[in-house]
Amino acid sequence: MAKLYFRYGVMGSSKSANALMVRYNYEERGQRALMVKPALDQREGERVVNSRMGLRYPCVWFEELEQMPPDEIKGWQCVIVDEAQFLTREQVHFLTELVDGLNVPVICYGLRADFSGHLFPGSEALLAWADIIEEVKTICWCGRKATCNARFDANGTVLKEGEQVVLGANDCYIGLCRRHWKEGNLGPDWKKAL
């Protein structure tokens, strides 16, 4: 029986790398896994899921998945969605239909909360509807578990207000433990991490 998975983690926790490795594992076993991400995330400028480790693989936009006929979707053994926090509630509902109606497993990777500690709409819906919720863990600069996404400016000031979606990577986001996120403390070597 197919399930809907939500694997969440903070920035820098290797969510995309994990998604790409899962896709590779399906391929290695002679099965097909469809890589998908929302068209909102065009940081790479092309249809590709990219990890900071250098792993890359072509993908389709989520909006294209929504237009696929059911028989085409059933031809995939798994659908893997990267950057799932950018999905709408309705798009997450669509994923539940793939799982429940077409019996296709769906594995979503994304952030749980934004830089200000608020849930993304896609993440909120996945937390409500996913069959299995798993954390992709990483650590803060201090060695504690990182649970918060910090957005920072060029001066190293941690920002707590602004637009919910500002696309970026290590140049403006870092995972921190709750204590250092609340303090706005990027650590003594934050510039070296850029």
Image (tube, rainbow, N blue to C red):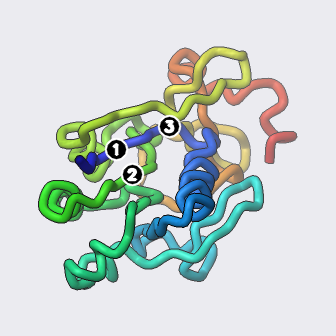
| Helix, strand or loop at mark 3 | loop
Residue 96 vs residue 71, the one in the foreground: 71
Query: Taking 30 as reference, is 137 above or below it?
Result: above
Q: Which residue is mark 3?
A: 9
Residue 140 vs residue 128, the one in the foreground: 128
Dot 2 amino acid type: Ile
Badge 3: residue crowd in 10 Å (few <14, some 14–19, many ≥20): many
- Give x and y (percent) for residue 173: 61, 45
Give the residue displayed 53% in from the left and 34% down from the top. Answer: 136
- Give x and y (percent) for residue 184: 59, 27
Query: Between tags 3 and 2, which lies in front?
Result: 2
Give the residue displayed 65% in from the left and 25% down from the top. Answer: 139
Pointers 3 and 2 in contact (C-beta within 8 Å): no
Pointers 1 and 2 in contact (C-beta within 8 Å): yes
| Helix, strand or loop at mark 1 | strand
Report the Cα–Cα distance between label 3 and label 2: 14 Å
Is 63 left or right of 151, judged from the image as shown? left
Q: Which residue is mark 2?
A: 107
Dot 1 amino acid type: Tyr
Is 188 left or right of 139, judged from the image as shown? right
Report the Cα–Cα distance between label 1 and label 2: 5 Å
The numbered mark, 3 or 2, whose residue comes first in the sequence reads 3
The numbered mark, 1 or 2, whose residue comes first in the sequence reads 1
Badge 1: residue crowd in 10 Å (few <14, some 14–19, many ≥20): many
Residue 3 vs residue 165, the one in the foreground: 3
Q: Which residue is mark 1?
A: 5
Give the residue displayed 72% in from the left and 55% down from the top. Answer: 52
